[in-house]
Amino acid sequence: MSVDGSAGAAPAQCVLVVEDEMFVAMLVEDILLNAGYRVLKAARVDKALDLIKADGTIDAALLDINLNGVEVFPVALKLRELGVPFVFASGYGRDGLPPDFNECPVLQKPYLPEALKAAVAALFA
């Protein structure tokens, strides 16, 4: 119960969005916030790894595979190590995924809002 005696809302599930295109990151953030998620954003691998270490409440992640020529796989490995589900995002589908990640879901870019929401919701299923 909250201070006023009403039942408190459950905290929103936190989704880490790793995307180097600012406009795309803002669009994804808007869609996920409107769907009720809490969103953390990073545009670089090192920043994403820092957020994972510092935040401690990341429940799932959306990972753009290519961040200005740098692959996001170190972030995926860390999330896998921590048991945090994630979906890759790519304009090229599964092309470029190493064999270690063949079982991982891939969301095709450009994003359709309903497909994005469904892909993230599936991570919590």
Image (spheres, grey):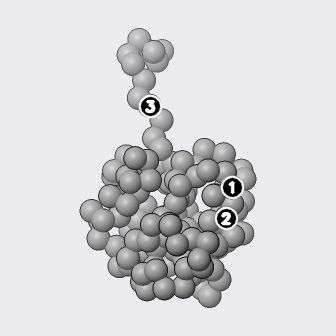
Report if residue 33 is visible in the image. no
Three-letter amino acid code of the residue under disc 2: Leu
Residue visible at 62% across and 88% down?
69
Q: Compared to 87, does 99 lie above or below?
A: below
Report if residue 68 is visible in the image. yes
Towards the viewer: 96 or 65: 96
Q: Which residue is mark 1?
A: 81
Q: How many marks?
A: 3
Please tell me whether mark 1 or mark 3 is closer to you in this view.
1
The answer to whether the residues at label 2 and label 3 have Cβ atoms under 8 Å apart is: no
Q: Compared to 65, does 10 lie above or below?
A: above
Question: Disc number at residue 70?
Answer: none
Q: Can you tell which quarter of the image residue 98 is in?
A: bottom right
Residue visible at 41% across and 57% down?
120
Q: Earlier in the sequence, mark 2 or mark 3?
A: 3
- Secondary element under disc 3, as helix, strand or loop, is loop
Count residues near mark 2 (Cα–Cα under 10 Å), then give few for <14, some for 14-19, many for 20+.
Answer: some
Q: Earlier in the sequence, mark 1 or mark 3?
A: 3
Residue visible at 48% across and 35% down?
11
Three-letter amino acid code of the residue under disc 3: Ala
Disc 2 from disc 3: Cα separation: 29 Å
Q: Position of residue 115 (x, y in %)?
A: 30, 65
Considering every residue shown, the one lying at the far top of the view is 5
Q: Position of residue 57 (x, y in %)?
A: 60, 44
Q: Which residue is mark 2?
A: 77
The answer to whether the residues at label 2 and label 1 have Cβ atoms under 8 Å apart is: yes
Question: Disc number at residue 10?
Answer: 3
Disc 2 from disc 1: Cα separation: 6 Å
Count residues near mark 1 (Cα–Cα under 10 Å), then give few for <14, some for 14-19, many for 20+.
Answer: few
Three-letter amino acid code of the residue under disc 1: Glu
Disc 1 from disc 3: Cα separation: 26 Å
